Image (tube, grey):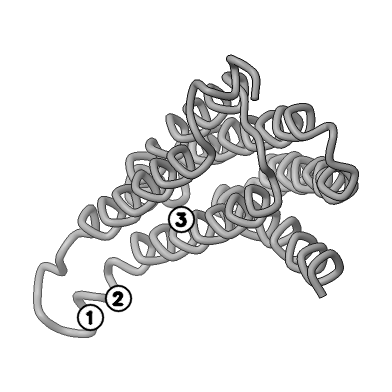
Amino acid sequence: MTAESKVMTKDRLVSFTDAVFAIIITILVLDLDLPEEPSFAGLWALREHFFAYAVSFFWLGAMWVNLHNQWHTASRITTRVIWHTILMLFFVSLIPYVSKFAGTHFTNMFAQCLYWAVAMLASINIMAQGYALGYANRGDPQYLESARTLNHWMWVDMGVKILGLILTLVWNYPPLAMVTILVAALIPSTVIRYLNQKFEG
């Protein structure tokens, strides 16, 4: 074990990440506004807020599953892995804020593009974390094969996000930016689930 690997154990970092995700999801639901009147019409008036909440919740859920599966077969971490995780959590912690902003200004291009930008920056750090984990576990051929495939699909994830932003701007339909974030998140989720079945089954 090197001096760098003694900085923090994988389990401690994973536990910290899980706790932060739990807090962020709790804040997300607490940020939902109550209807002005206790009726279906009152709830319907908040439909855009609930849509933003649902997209953010399932995007965060998909990200949490992806991270769990990414970490599952890794045995070592480095300082580089830790800092990419911290940066990822920083941008993820902004999701309740930009989710409420986008829900309040649902058809505003700036609000939706800001949501997209925060999600994109979180994804970039997840990808960087994946490459850092691959380097930290470069002596494990099985992990490297799994990580290499996942990293390729993370590029697809980025491509979907970028395509979504382009279509949002071309079609001038701001909410599409938010929807493509969720669609992109489902791609690596499916791939990681397949990899786990392949290597463990």
Which residue, given by chain and number where applicable, does mark 2 sit on?
44
Q: Residues within 10 Å of mark 3 (few under 14, many from 20)?
A: many
Q: Residue at x 70, y 35 (%)?
A: 127
Q: How much space separates mark 1 and mark 2, taking CA atoms?
A: 5 Å
Q: How much space separates mark 3 and mark 1, taking CA atoms?
A: 23 Å
Tell me: 71 left or right of 82. right
Query: Which disc number belongs to residue 56?
Result: 3
Q: Is residue 67 above or below residue 37?
A: above
Label 2 element class: helix
Give the total number of marks visible in the rendering.
3
Label 3 element class: helix
Say which amino acid is labelled 2. Answer: Trp
Q: Quadrant of the N terminus?
A: top right
Tell me: 73 left or right of 111. right
Q: Residues within 10 Å of mark 1 (few under 14, many from 20)?
A: few
Which residue, given by chain and number where applicable, does mark 1 sit on?
41
When asked about the image quadrant of residue 3, the answer is top right
| Residue 199 image offset from top left, x and y in percent | 84, 64
Tell me: 86 left or right of 69. left
Q: How much space separates mark 3 and mark 2, taking CA atoms?
A: 19 Å
Say which amino acid is labelled 1. Answer: Ala
Q: Residue at x 48, y 28 (%)?
A: 8
Q: Residue at x 78, y 27 (%)?
A: 135
Determine whether label 1 and label 2 are within 8 Å by CB.
Answer: yes
> Marks 3 and 2: which is nearer the front?
3
Of pointers 3 and 1, the one earlier in the residue sequence:
1
Q: Quadrant of the C terminus?
A: bottom right
Label 1 element class: helix
Of pointers 3 and 2, the one earlier in the residue sequence:
2
Say which amino acid is labelled 3. Answer: Ser
Q: Is residue 113 above or below residue 157?
A: above
| Residue 121 image offset from top left, x and y in percent | 59, 30
